[in-house]
Amino acid sequence: MAKSESKKMHRTIIEGLFWQPSVCTGSQRSYTHVLPSVGVGSPDLLFYGDDGNEAWFGLHVGQTDRLTFLGNPQQHIRASFIDCRKGSKTLHRRVDLQFCPDPTQQLVIDRGIAHAFSNTRHITVRVENTWFMANNNPDYDIANDSINFRGDDSPNDFPVVAVNDLPLPPEVQQYVIASQQRAIEAGTYNNFTNRVVIAGQSRKVLINSKS
């Protein structure tokens, strides 16, 4: 059953899903300088050109996200989360949030917590990642750590994953991201795989960015 939470509740019923202050300076009515967080690699910036699709959820096995939402402070973003972590006391519990962009706060989504956002048109999100590896985890795909599924399916068909537990140094993440950026600039970073869970069955999809 879904449980609605206010952003003012910095902790949610799902452990590892919470709000925390961003590292900011010069916070004024007219501007805020948001600084990099300690202990994370290079940030990504995502711009939503549409309103998002709340039916599809995505999760990471080896990545914890820290999200800072930037945009119209009056725009209400809807977000839903489903715990897919093997052994979690809140396995397949769902939490729904509604909040407005606020550069002074960041949303932390731990590994194995699926998430979906809607009403995100013209919103920019700063994504700061912490990456994790494992000695042997069959649920982890190093080629693309993303699993997608529909949130309106039966909870019995939701993924159940073991998450990685060995944190990578930020320098390793920065090296990988720099390599990806060079491949994009050279035009050689075209194909990537994604895993989609449909009716409880996992399928691997090859996506060509030039198609």
Image (tube, rainbow, N blue to C red):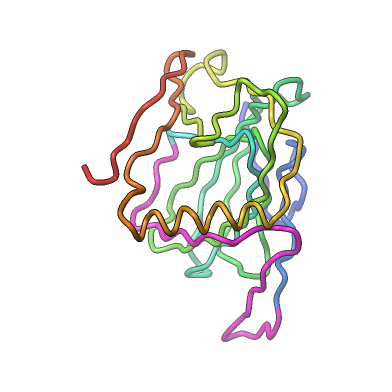
Give the residue displayed 32% in from the left and 45% down from the top.
190
Q: Position of residue 192 (x, y in %)?
A: 39, 38
Q: Percent from the top left, x then y, of residue 17?
A: 71, 43
Q: Which residues are magenta?
A: 25-54
Q: Nearer the viewer, residue 42 or 176?
A: 176
Q: Does residue 2 sit above or below 67 in this rendering?
A: above
Q: Nearer the viewer, residue 171 or 146?
A: 171
Residue 158 percent location from the top left of the image: 55, 20
Any part of residue 58 in sight: no
Which image quarter: residue 161?
top right
Q: Is residue 15 above or below residue 152?
A: below
In reply to whether residue 177 is colored magenta, the answer given is no
Q: Quadrant of the N terminus?
A: top right
Horizontal relation, residue 28 to residue 203: left or right: right
How many marks the image carries: the answer is 0
At 57% from the left edge and 86% from the top edge, which residue is drawn? 30
Q: Who is closer to the viewer here, 132 or 116?
A: 132
Q: Main secondary structure of the magenta part?
A: loop
Q: Quadrant of residue 24?
A: bottom right
Q: Nearer the viewer, residue 60 or 52?
A: 60
Q: Which quadrant of the view contains residue 28?
A: bottom right
The question of residue 40 being in magenta is answered with yes
